Image: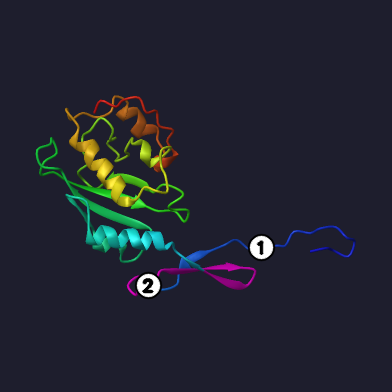
């Protein structure tokens, strides 16, 4: 907009606020954003809804979606996982926490183990953070929640020895709560 003197002036915008508009359950996830006194409707990506249904209807072996985790928010899921038969983790139960940003699928989800039982593995820290390249720099929008689950199952299944990463205690003391903010160094393909 031009002022009377011909100088360009930036339009003043109030900060955007995102809040739930409709409860989960009717199949539509919608939020409202407020800018300069008017409402703008924003739909969460259909891709996330599609992946949620795929995980509910056809989960990877040993994985089930914790239905309670998605009742209030489609952006945070808990996936219950059981160790694959014939592996070091056979019969063990774990939980994976998936958090999705508004930029999903262009931005990878935040994925970590949660709960009381964190697997002892050379690429899993005791705070639940997972050192797996597809969760950070090798992420592609072509990947899905199911492909992440399969990669984690494969990572655990190929483990030959249960042990923590060598720098576990230092990392857990100094890391950010969000594993995506860690600059991982991928140097070991043997586990």
Residue placed at 31% from the left, 45% from the top? 148
Residue 129's x, y, as percent?
32, 39
The disc label shown at residue 158, or none: none
Q: Is residue 190 magenta?
A: no
Q: Residue at x 44, y 63 (%)?
A: 44
Q: Which residues are magenta?
A: 23-41
Which residue is labeled 1 in the image?
Answer: 13
Q: Position of residue 180 (x, y in %)?
A: 42, 41
Q: Which residue is under mark 2? A: 23
- Label 2 to label 1: alpha-carbon separation: 28 Å
Any part of residue 74 in sight: no
In this view, which residue lies farthest toward the right? 5
Residue 39 among magenta residues:
yes
For the residue pair 136 and 121, the one nearer the viewer reads as 136
Mark 2 vs mark 1: which is more N-terminal? 1
Q: Position of residue 55 (x, y in %)?
A: 26, 57
> Is residue 158 depicted above or below 83 in this figure?
above
* Label 2: which secondary element: loop
**Quarter of image, res 177:** top left
| Residue visible at 27% across and 47% down in the picture | 149
């Amino acid at each position: 907009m031009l002022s009377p003197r011909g100088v360009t002036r930036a339009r003043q915008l109030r900060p955007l606020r995102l809040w739930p508009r409709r409860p989960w359950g009717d199949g539509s996830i919608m939020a409202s954003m407020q800018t300069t006194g008017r409402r703008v409707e924003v739909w969460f990506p259909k891709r996330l809804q599609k992946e949620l249904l795929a995980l509910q209807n056809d989960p990877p072996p040993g994985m089930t979606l914790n239905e309670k985790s998605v009742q209030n928010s489609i952006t945070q899921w808990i996936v219950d996982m059981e160790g694959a038969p014939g592996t070091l983790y056979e019969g063990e139960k774990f939980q994976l926490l998936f958090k999705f940003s508004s930029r999903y699928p262009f931005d990878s989800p935040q994925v970590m183990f949660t709960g009381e039982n964190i697997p002892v593995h050379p690429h899993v820290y005791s705070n639940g953070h997972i050192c797996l390249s597809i969760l950070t720099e090798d992420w592609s929008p072509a990947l899905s929640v199911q492909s992440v689950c399969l990669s984690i199952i494969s990572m655990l299944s190929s483990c030959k020895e249960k042990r923590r990463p060598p720098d576990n205690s230092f990392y857990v003391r100094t890391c950010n709560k969000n594993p995506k903010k860690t600059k991982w160094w991928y140097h070991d393909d043997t586990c």
